[in-house]
Image: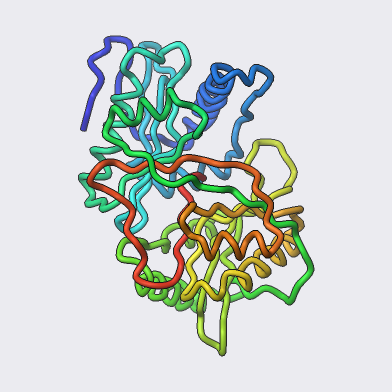
C-alpha cells in the first residue's frame, strides 16, 4: 500500500468511530473549499449524520483509511468500498491547507491498491462534472470518464402497503436476504449487496423494499431514511441499490419507493440513474421523477463496469 513521504503527513491508518467528528470537519471544509473554487462562494457543505458515517465506515471495513498531520489531526481520508467485486471510493477528501502537495494522489492510490488487493473487478468513483480540476486530477491517476449519473427525486405518494424486509422476523430476513442475492447474481457478475442490506437493518437507518410478481421476488431497493445531514429532520429517502429481474418492473418499483417515502414520513425519494439505462430513465421520468443533480462516473482503466446479464442493477457510488 502507498505511503506518504511528506514529513508532516502519516498514514494510512484505520478509521474508527472516534474519528468521525474530526473527519466530518475535514469533509465539510474540503467540499466547501471545492465549491468556493468553482465560484459558488456562498455554499457551505454541512457535516454528515453520525449514523451515516457509521454505516459508511462499517461497510468499507479496512478500506476506510485516514492520514494524520504531525499533531495527530486528520489530514485526509479515503473510504473504499467493495460490494462483491464492484469497488468504488467515496467520500475522499484532503484538508484544504494540504492540497496541491501530492497528498491527494497518495490517498487515491492507496484506495486503488486496497481494492486491487481484494480482487476488485470494477474500480470507480464519482465526481462533479463541472469541476474540470477534479476530472483532470483523476484522469492523471488512470481514471477514464464514463456516463453521467442523474439524481432524480420522486415525491412521496400514497400507495399499497409496501413489502419490505423490516416487516419480517430474523429467520425470514435471512432467507429473504439470500433470495435477494440470488436475484442479484442472476443479473450481475460482480455485485453482492448482502452486507449493505444487513448493515442498514442493524443500524436502523432504513429498509429494503421488496417487489414481487406472482409471489416471486422480482426486485428490491435498498433505501436509507435517516437524515444525511447532521441535525436535520428526516426529509428525503435515498435509494442506494436497486436490482430488478426485468426493466418492465421499473415503474412498479418507482411507485413502491414513493409509497415507502410516505410511510417513512419523508417528503421525497432520491434515485440515481446512470445515463445509458434508457428504459429506466424514461420510466422514472414517466413516474414523475424530476432531475435534481448530476455526477460524472469514472472508472480506472482496466477496471470498467460490467454489463448486466439481464435485468437492471443500479449501484450508488455515494453514501
Residue at 67% in and 56% down? 289
- What x and y, as percent, mark residue 123? 31, 45
Is residue 270 placed above or below 220 in the rendered structure? above
Considering the image in quadrants, where does the N terminus appear? top left
> Does residue 199 appear to the left or right of 123 in the view shown?
right
Query: In this orientation, which residue lies closer to the viewer: 64 or 213?
Result: 213
Instruction: Tell me what residue is drawn at x 43 percent, y 18 percent.
Output: 73
| Residue 6 image-quadrant placement | top left
Tell me where residue 92 appears, x and y as whole percent.
Answer: 43, 32
Q: Look at the picture and state if 70 lies above or below 177.
A: above
Nearer to the camera, 70 or 311: 311
Tell which of 89 and 19 is nearer to you: 89
The percent position of residue 155, horizontal first and vertical second, equals 74, 57
In the visual, does 303 lie left or right of 270?
left
Q: Residue at x 37, y 15 (%)?
A: 69
Residue 53 showing in the rendered view: yes
Q: Where residue 150 appears, x then y in whole percent?
A: 56, 48
Asked if residue 232 is positioned above or below residue 67 in the image, the reply reads below
Amino acid at each position: 500500500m502507498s505511503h506518504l513521504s511528506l514529513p508532516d503527513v502519516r498514514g494510512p491508518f484505520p478509521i474508527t468511530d472516534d474519528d468521525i467528528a474530526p473527519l466530518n470537519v475535514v469533509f465539510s471544509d474540503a467540499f466547501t473549499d471545492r465549491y468556493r473554487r468553482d465560484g459558488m462562494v456562498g455554499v457551505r457543505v454541512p457535516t454528515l449524520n453520525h449514523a451515516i458515517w457509521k454505516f459508511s465506515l462499517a461497510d468499507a471495513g479496512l478500506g476506510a483509511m485516514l492520514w494524520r498531520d504531525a499533531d495527530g489531526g486528520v489530514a485526509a481520508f479515503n473510504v473504499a468500498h467493495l460490494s462483491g467485486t464492484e469497488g468504488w471510493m467515496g467520500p475522499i477528501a484532503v484538508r484544504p491547507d494540504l492540497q496541491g502537495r501530492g497528498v491527494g494522489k497518495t490517498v487515491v492510490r492507496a484506495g486503488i491498491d486496497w481494492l486491487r488487493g481484494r480482487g476488485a473487478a470494477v474500480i470507480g468513483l464519482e465526481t462533479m462534472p463541472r469541476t474540470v480540476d477534479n476530472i483532470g486530477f483523476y484522469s492523471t491517476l488512470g481514471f477514464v470518464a464514463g456516463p453521467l449519473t442523474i439524481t432524480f427525486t420522486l415525491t412521496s405518494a400514497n400507495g399499497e402497503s409496501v413489502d419490505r424486509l423490516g416487516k419480517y422476523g430474523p429467520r425470514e430476513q435471512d432467507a429473504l436476504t439470500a433470495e435477494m442475492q440470488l436475484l442479484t447474481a442472476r443479473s450481475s457478475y460482480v455485485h453482492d449487496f448482502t452486507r449493505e442490506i444487513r448493515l442498514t437493518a442493524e443500524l436502523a437507518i432504513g429498509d429494503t423494499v421488496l417487489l414481487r410478481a406472482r409471489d416471486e421476488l422480482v426486485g428490491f431497493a435498498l433505501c436509507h431514511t435517516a437524515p444525511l445531514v447532521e441535525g436535520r429532520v428526516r426529509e428525503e429517502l435515498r435509494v442506494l441499490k436497486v436490482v430488478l429481474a426485468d426493466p418492465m418492473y421499473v415503474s412498479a418499483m418507482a411507485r413502491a419507493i414513493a409509497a415507502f417515502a410516505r410511510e417513512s414520513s419523508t417528503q421525497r425519494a432520491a434515485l440515481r440513474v446512470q445515463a445509458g439505462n434508457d428504459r429506466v430513465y424514461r420510466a422514472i421520468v414517466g413516474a414523475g421523477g424530476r432531475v435534481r443533480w448530476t455526477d460524472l462516473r469514472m472508472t480506472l482503466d482496466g477496471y470498467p463496469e460490467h454489463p448486466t446479464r439481464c435485468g437492471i442493477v443500479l449501484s450508488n457510488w455515494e453514501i
